[in-house]
Image: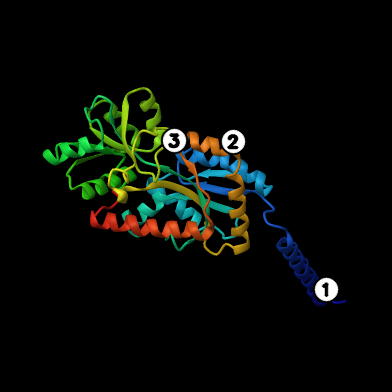
């Protein structure tokens, strides 16, 4: 055998070995290695606190480690962008949520589409928003607050974690629905905004339950209305916005899991079933409910529909308010 023949034979054997390796890789059941979940928020934040116990439950359901990668940024943009650009093989998932659907209308020239650039897997849960005031504010209920707002347009101020935040948009919707005018005081984050409400600097704020509950129990804050479809089990005496005549304010801050667009449908279905199984765990459900979140199981099609509808809903509102991220 001459040198050329030997070289050709070696190349053929190497090619055959590569083909066999690729075939073996394809034949391996999915998942065969750890799965990464991009959490678009800092460690210790609300998203992170939800995802870490869920990751363990998913790991048990899938038989592989599920590891967290935090990618925080305003509007959850950086994490979602990284998730959309990942290889669509099911080994990189992204924690998505209502914040993404709001960001779609706030940020110009996003490099991804939250609706079209993901294969959405399913929801994790949803948390209502609570409209709160200081306990000594003098507002016995929401009608009392609205009555004063009608008598004194612009005199009542409200805090938010920033322009375009969930609290800001819900208060804008309330003003439109009730025919009132309030003064918006945006902050750089929810913590300083709530602190100024507690200190009496600002009158009103809309916050998630887990933020409000400690101060409500301490007697410092009073909840006037909740944005969920039903009353909160934690505060059954507080009415919903719908009960008070404002059904358009029914909204929950939801979160879920998504994979990059093009992820094989069988893998999406495996992940969907694993997520649903994880959410059946009583300990996990209790943990989520303690944090003010109601576990919510939606199929890939249902979660995709939710992402699409909320992108349209919040996009219409942010455009009408001419809001853009700073």
Which mark sits nearer the N-terminus, 2 or 3?
3
For image coordinates 39% across by 25% down, the residue present is: 217
Quadrant for residue 322, please give it. bottom left
Which mark sits nearer the N-terminus, 1 or 2?
1
User: x%, y% of residue 168?
Assistant: 28, 44
Q: Residues within 10 Å of mark 2 (few under 14, many from 20)?
A: few
Please state if 254 lies on the left or on the right of 146 as rendered: right
Residue beneath label 3, please?
Answer: 233
Q: Residues within 10 Å of mark 3 (few under 14, many from 20)?
A: few
State the SS at label 1.
helix
Residue beneath label 2, please?
Answer: 283
State the SS at label 2.
helix
Residue beneath label 1, please?
Answer: 6
User: x%, y% of residue 262?
Assistant: 55, 64
Q: Is residue 265 visible?
A: yes
The figure's colour scheme reads rainbow
Exactly how many numbered labels are in the figure?
A: 3
Q: Measure how far apart labels 1 and 2 are at the Cα level.
A: 63 Å
Which callout, 1 or 3, points to the residue nearer the camera? 3
State the SS at label 3.
loop
In this view, 129 is above or below 26: above
């Amino acid at each position: 055998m001459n040198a050329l023949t030997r070289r050709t034979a070696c190349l053929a054997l190497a090619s055959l070995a590569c083909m066999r390796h690729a075939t073996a890789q394809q034949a391996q059941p999915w998942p065969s290695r750890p799965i990464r979940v991009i959490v678009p928020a800092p460690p210790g934040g609300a998203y992170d606190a939800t995802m870490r116990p869920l990751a363990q439950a998913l790991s048990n359901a899938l038989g592989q480690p599920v590891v967290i990668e935090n990618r925080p940024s305003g509007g959850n943009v950086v994490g979602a962008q990284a998730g959309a650009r990942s290889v669509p093989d099911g080994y990189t998932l992204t924690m998505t949520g209502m914040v993404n659907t709001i960001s779609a209308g706030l940020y110009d020239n996003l490099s991804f589409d939250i609706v079209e650039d993901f294969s959405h897997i399913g929801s994790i849960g949803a948390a209502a928003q609570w409209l709160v005031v200081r306990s000594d504010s003098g507002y016995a209920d929401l009608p009392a607050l609205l009555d004063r707002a009608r008598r004194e347009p612009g005199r009542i101020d409200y805090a938010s974690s920033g322009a375009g935040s969930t609290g800001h948009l819900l208060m804008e919707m309330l003003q439109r629905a009730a025919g009132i005018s309030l003064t918006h005081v945006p902050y750089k984050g929810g913590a300083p905004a709530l602190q100024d409400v507690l200190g009496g600097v600002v009158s009103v704020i809309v916050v998630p339950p887990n933020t409000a509950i400690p101060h409500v129990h301490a007697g410092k804050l009073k909840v006037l209305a909740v944005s969920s479809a039903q009353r909160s089990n934690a505060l059954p005496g507080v009415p919903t916005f719908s009960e008070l005549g404002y059904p358009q304010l029914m909204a929950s801050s939801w979160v879920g899991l998504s994979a990059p667009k093009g992820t094989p449908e069988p893998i999406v279905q495996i992940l969907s079933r694993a997520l649903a199984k994880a959410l059946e765990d009583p300990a996990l459900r209790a943990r989520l409910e303690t944090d003010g979140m109601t576990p919510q199981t939606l199929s890939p099609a249902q979660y995709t529909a939710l992402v699409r509808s909320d992108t349209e809903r919040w996009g219409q509102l942010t455009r009408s308010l001419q809001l853009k991220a700073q």
